[in-house]
Image: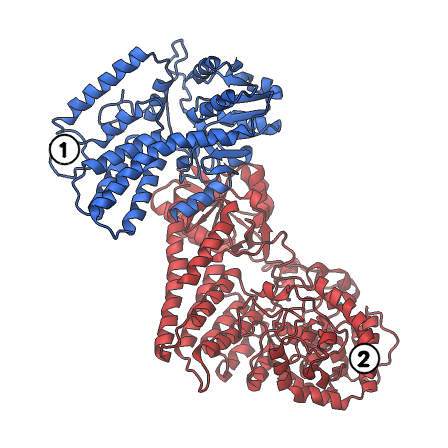
Chain colours: A red, B blue
Amino acid sequence: MDTRRVSSAVPRVRQVGFFTPNTPAHQPAPTRSQSGPPTSDSPPLSDSPASNSLSPVMIPPPRHLSDNLGGRAYALPVPGRGNAGEHATVGSYNPSESVLWLESPPRSRIGDEELSEGTESSLGWYRRSNSAKVASSLPSGGFDLSQVKQPESVAAVEAKNPLPEKSEAQKEQASNPKSLKAKTTKAERRALQESQRAAKAASKAEANKSNAPGGAASSKPMKQPPQKKDGPPVASSVAASERGVDRPVEKERKKDLPPPRMQFDDESRVDKAKRRSLLNQPEARNRVELFRHLPPHKNGSQLPYLESKFFELHEMHPSVYKVGLQYLTGDTSGGNARCIAMLQAFQEAIRDYSTPPEKTLNRDLTSKIGGFVSFLIECRPLSMSMGNAIRFLKSRIARLPLTLSESEAKAALCSDIDRFINEKIVLADKVILRHAATKIRDGDVLLTYGSSCVVEMILLYAHEIGKQFRVVVVDSRPMLEGQKQLRRLVAKGLSCTYTQLNAISYVMHEVTRVFLGASSIFSNGTVYSRVGTASVAMVAHAFHVPVLVCCEAYKFHERVQLDSICFNELGDPDAVSKVPGREDVNYLDNLTDKQKENLQLLNLKYDATPSDYISVIVTDYGMIPPTSVPVIVREYRKEYLLI
Amino acid sequence: MADSLQNPKPNVSAYYQTRAAHHAVVTSDWLAQAQAAVSIQTDDDSSGSDGRIAPVTGGKGYDKAFSVIDEFNSWRKQPDLAEAVAAIRALAAVIRASQATTMMELEIELKKASDSLKAWDSTSISLTAGCDLFMRYVTRTSALEYEDFNSARSRLIERAEKFGEISCKARRIIAMLCQDFIFDGCTILVHGFSRVVFEVLKTAAQNKKHFRVFCTEGRPDRTGLRLSNELAKLDVPVKLLIDSAVAYTMDEVDMVLVGADGIVESGGIINMMGTYQIALVSHSMNKPVYVAAESYKFARLYPLDQKDLGPALRTIDFGVPIPSKVEVEKSARDYTPPQYLTLLFTDLGVLTPSVVSDELIQLYL
């Protein structure tokens, strides 16, 4: 999925500074990256006509700010075409991208026209410096800011927290595109290296952030020509500047995502940009460096505004929009719930869909779905279950026989979705219940962590069939998901104990079995689940308590992950410092800005549990040891490809 | 022994009763007598089977009086025959005696027979596994039915017969695979009397390898005594240990070789009581633990701990009367988790414990 997009093996030639990306617009948008100087893969690509048309230095002129805002639409993540996961290699030279890029020449052209090379460079430089100033940590030279207007500075910031060398390079580039190629190359290489290092994996990042301030951080966006449009960089630079802690490290943001396939419809891009820019929050402060590659959290404070926009959608289907907002606010959470909500929204969208003239259903619908998915990613990064479901849906669409009429095709797709939900989730859960209930004996003390719907079902089912056991519910801040589950269990009459994660080793000695849910399981048997699960599993292992992970097979993924860092999701950092209901616990509230610089709040959502701590994985294929996950992935993929 | 409809001693695992019988020192006279007795009994039983369980006839009249359980028992009494093979042969007899005219009917009969066999002795893993395996084979065959019923049926019977040969061949295959692991001058610790392991050692002796064997006494079955008897006949240097002396002698041991009653999905094994102990000691002293077992022993069980297995109890004779207040741990087998096992020698090849689940998935899914 997204992660695949990000870590493409193709070397991303990144142009430091403002180079336009001849490059791969297909990079998923790290909208952020769009800003400014997307590192384009340019030097090699500079040969392409498209790239040539743009001057190397893409410095959005200030006056185009508004344009940019509109134009920022690309967002990009998840190009409609292709799989969610298969984004074009970053930095690869993709002719189609060039075409895409060409489509929006006007903007860039304008930018070019407005800036003389010299100015460009200087502007770019200034931008850099501005951003540097803004960042307050960039060792930019003493550039004077006078010339640079705010937007420009923003753009500069966007351009990425350029390194001085980069700016130099850019400057040079600006002045002499041709001769600079050589220099640029070096800088690019450097930039490329940095971007590659930084841009690991995961996170979609594409979305808004890239448009917004995020853009600044990630120069990666440079790769996407469309994104590069002046507009976005400006906007993003604004956001970027707001980031208090812009450091050179910012450029390491993983914005190196392959640009998402953009919609070709400008109007939609505008809409999306607007929407997206609203969704973006300039939340740049207090971010932990190690996790800068992950997209920052979007909280739901914009909800009222977004809700009001519900009726202004044209590109976005209302049910998809609704689901997106539900994700954003956290109303819908949990792998199964999110996946089902998304699939049902897609079903609605497919039912209301009608093929535009001159287009085939397959392609157009796929691109539409891609657009929906990008929106959902902006609201909240995809979970693995959703990613697999999207892949399934896209493969079904691609597999539709061309002889079907539109209504037949739509009906077939809707029934496929129904079947998927039914077989892979509902029935799978029933099978898991049966298997797992055989492992519960009378007198057991079962421990569960957080709130997994499958585990809850298992406990209720075992209780129904008359097994005598008691439950220990372990919970953790800041989400406190266990409380909801506790309430439901107690309502059904189970005897429960409730405690927090810090008491896990205290409680573990009396526990006989541990039941955990999972967001996904990777091919090396690593379980990717709510943060804290790894701790529970480790303590259970130390106490020789068997750990049972209950997960439907559709959530398995062929990825391999060794740690919790390269791919994860960030939550709201403020939730860590605030305790709801305890207003007196406000020690972190009145820090000065200087102090705040030293404080970095981290709120991770997921973690990876190594397979050694897992005794058995209960799936709808039966009980399997963690080493057999790749076998299931192999068999399972075959099966759903053949459906 | 257990000729009746029900297992006469429900508290004692029939499987282990049989093993115990096998383990007893048997003279040929005794064997002849026993077999004679058995055949008379089955004849008696076969006639007038009113009260008998006739699962396969399914109401086809009592003159059939065919009891799969009796059939099974008769096969099982042969000391050299594996449980699963006996089960499959019994099921083959079911097919032969069946009067079904369609595959579906035959399948249903077989399913009933298989269920009754499994219910009769629920503790025997290889029995269950063998039945499941055969049923799986039958289902797959019937799914490909494009031939007439009779030829399909004869194919099934033939396959069942072949299964018996496969079983013997399996032992030889395993013995051949094992040879590379037994080097000259090595010391092998053996626990329990597994016919597969015995075959391995026999083959090694025949190949003129120089090795010596430590046998644990194997209380209460006295398997060690029997094994040492047999090995002595082969001129293999044998040393008998009491079960508690395993850790003491582990230094001198190069490898541990055990059989298995069943291999479970996690890759662990279920074997005679004491195997887990030995595996733990060897693991902590870095000695490899090898398991030699045929592939039909792969079972779809997944025990999480020792108590997760169905109980298989056997009587233990301490030689002196025990006061009734004293409880005795009567379980006859234990579960060794896969992390303590090094390799599995099966007729499918030399495997690591994690492969078991892969094989099972491919077989059953």
Residue corresponding to mark 2? A173
Residue corresponding to mark 1? B64
Residue B246 sits above or below residue A179 on the image? above
Question: From this viewpoint, is residue B107 visible?
Answer: no
Question: Please, which chain is the residue tagged with disc 1 on?
Answer: B
Name the residue located 59 percent from the left edge and 54 percent from the top edge: A560
Name the residue located 18 percent from the left edge and 32 percent from the top edge: B66
Cα distance between the residues tagged 1 and 2: 97 Å
Residue A475 sits above or below residue A583 on the image? above
Packing grade of label 2 (10 A; few <14, some 14-19, many >=20) is many
Q: Position of residue A143 (x, y in %)?
A: 86, 78
In the image, what residue type sits under mark 1? Answer: Lys
Name the residue located 44 percent from the left edge and 28 percent from the top edge: B271
Q: How many marks?
A: 2
Which part of the image, by quadrant, shows the C terminus of chain A? bottom left
Mark 2, secondary structure of its residue: helix
Q: Position of residue B181 (x, y in %)?
A: 56, 29
Which part of the image, by quadrant, shows the N terminus of chain A? bottom right
